[in-house]
Every structure is written in C-alpha cells, then in structure tokens.
Image: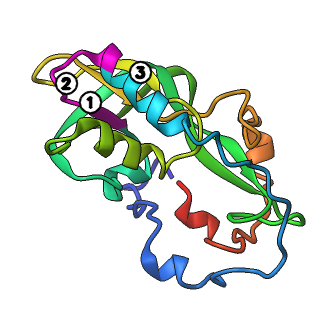
Amino acid sequence: MSGLKHPPIVPPLRLTRTLVDRLPPRVDERGPVMLEDPPPEFHHRTAAGILERLDTQGAVWVFAAGSLIWNPRMEVAERRAAQVTGWRRAFCLTDRRFRGCPSTPGLMMSLDRGGACSGVVLRMDTGDDPLAALVSLLQKEPPVPPEHVTAETEAGPVEAILFAADPGFPLYRPEPPMEELATCSPVPWGTSARRANTC
C-alpha cells in the first residue's frame, strides 16, 4: 500500500434515508411499559423552577445534540452552534417496547455525564407566556427534570437547559464497552420506530 502513488479514496460513512428504508418499519413484539405518567403538577412545577433559576427575563435556551436539532418540538427564535463540558453523547438508554423489543432491545443515544459535547443552543420563542411554552416542551420529553448547563458559543456563554439521561430513569443503563456495542443485534427496529432513527 505504501507504494501507491495516490492512496485509495474511502467514501464517508453516512446513514441515508435509502438505507433506513431498507429496514422493516416496525415489529409486532411488544415489550413491557417501563414508564409511568408523572404527577399532574410535575411539568408546571418543573417549568416554574427552570424560569426562576434561569432569571433571564423569560429567555429560555435549550441545548440540543440529537433529534432536538432537526425536530425541536418547540418554536425557535434563535439558534447558535455551542459546546457544553461535562456531558457527552452515549448509547445509555435501552428500550424493549417502542424502539426495540424483548428479543432485540434497542439502544438509544442520549446525553450522559462526562466529556464534552458539541451541538446547538436553541432560544425558545415563548411568545407572551414563557411558562406555558416551557410546559409544552417538557410534556414532549421524558419525565425527568432537565439539567442546567453553561453552553459556550461564539457570541459568549449561554445559560441553558439540557435533557439528559438520569441514572434513576427506568430506561437508563451505562453505555456498554465498544466491544459490546459492536455486537448489538443487526435487526434495529421496534414497534414505533427503527433504531436508526434514535440517534
């Protein structure tokens, strides 16, 4: 190989819609329901606490590193490239019902403690009611209070919230070693979504 005048060109590895569409969209094998609905006051109480702690005249920034980037599930007024320290992307959520099944459990990515992570901070368009806007977002996320972080951007640091995997969350499991990840089942789908959509 060292005698080659021009090294071989290796195309970049990309997960494309064409590849995803080759997988069956779902299976019929349903696993157990692992999550219970939170208390009725959970989302309102959590949102009020976030607004009180941020103390930013109603501006709410959300750090996004996964699906929140392309599917923010909220109205966005501004976005900036950002990085947070102390958090990293990891395969640390397991699911046997919606994005996996009992025979082939799904491993999903979330943010876990340690390292650093690049992503985007999104400033919510909260309209005239920041509390209602934040409650609406929280209702679309797992019932775990978000973390408070400082996101570094080119325009300066931003105080933001971050949705992360909590060790007490029923679906949480520490990311397995690379050797175990490499042997995960090549049948990546569940009753709701292909595991290729979970990153």
Whether residue 123 is visible here, answered yes or no, is: no
Q: Which comes sooner in the sequence, label 2 or label 1?
A: 1
Residue 145 point in image, percent of width and height? 53, 29
Disc 2 target residue: 153
Is residue 144 placed above or below 4 in the rendered structure?
above
- Disc 1 marks a residue whose amino acid type is Ala
What is the secondary structure assignment of the residue under circle 3?
Answer: helix
Q: Is residue 190 above or below residue 79?
A: below
Q: Which mark is residue 197?
A: none
| Magenta region includes residue 81 | no
Horizontal side, residue 74 vs residue 77: left or right: right
Residues at circles 2 and 1 in contact by the CB criterion of under 8 Å: yes
Residue 82 location (% of width, % of height): 26, 30
- Which residue is found at the position 53% from the left and 54% from the top? 199
Q: First in sequence: mark 1 or mark 3?
A: 3
Image quadrant assignment for residue 32? bottom right
- The front one of 143 and 45 is 45
Could you tell whether 56 is left or right of 46 in the image? left
First reached walking from the N terminus: tag 2 or tag 3 = 3
Q: Residue 53 colored magenta?
A: yes
Which residue is disc 3 drawn over? Answer: 49
Mark 2 and mark 1: span between their CA atoms? 5 Å
- Report the residue marked by disc 1: 82
- SS for tag 2? loop
Residue located at (69% from left, 71% from top): 189
Residue range highlighted in magenta: 52-63
Q: Quadrant of residue 63?
A: top left
Instruction: Give me the residue at 22% from left, 53% from top.
Output: 75
